[in-house]
Image (tube, rainbow, N blue to C red):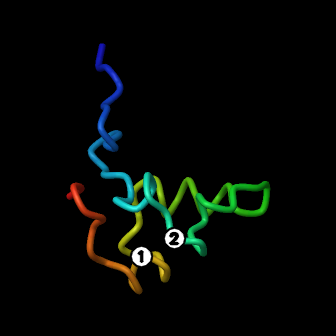
Amino acid sequence: MKHAKTGGEHAGRRQCPWVKAPFEECFCRRMNSLSTEAIIYYCGGNFSECEIYRRHPAPPPGRE
């Protein structure tokens, strides 16, 4: 049985590097029922497609 990955990685995908230090406009910052799908999709591994991430592509200090 495989165990869940930790450290921002799940099923081979990396979590958005900004999840732990989000910008004001980040989906995970304003978590509500309208943003849930975007949080799962963008913050959970497809952050390179996120317009917010594209404006701030560099990872926060201390994160890669």
Q: Which mark is residue 31?
A: none
Q: Residues within 10 Å of mark 1 (few under 14, many from 20)?
A: many
Amino acid at dot 2: Phe
* Res 26 → quadrant: bottom right
Task: Indicate the quadrant containing the N terminus: top left, top right, bottom left or bottom right.
Answer: top left
Q: Nearer the viewer, residue 36 or 12?
A: 36
Secondary structure category for the residue under label 1: helix
Left or right placement of residue 16 versus residue 25 in this view: left
State the image coordinates of residue 61 (x, y, percent, origin top left): 25, 62
* Res 12 → quadrant: top left
Residue at image position (40%, 67%) is: 47
* Distance of label 2 from label 1 (alpha carbons): 9 Å
Task: Indicate the quadrant containing the C terminus: top left, top right, bottom left or bottom right.
Answer: bottom left
Residue at image position (30%, 38%) is: 7
Q: Nearer the viewer, residue 10 or 61?
A: 61
State the image coordinates of residue 42 (x, y, percent, origin top left): 49, 64
Residue furthest front as drawn: 61
Q: Which mark is residue 23?
A: 2
Q: Residues within 10 Å of mark 2 (few under 14, many from 20)?
A: some
Determine whether label 2 and label 1 are within 8 Å by CB.
no
Mark earlier in primary sequence (2, 1): 2
Amino acid at dot 1: Tyr
Residue at image position (65%, 58%) is: 37
State the image coordinates of residue 49 (x, y, percent, origin top left): 42, 76
* Res 25 → quadrant: bottom right
Residue furthest right as drawn: 33
Residue at image position (42%, 76%) is: 53
9 to 33, vertically: above or below: above
Secondary structure category for the residue under label 2: loop
Q: Which mark is residue 53?
A: 1
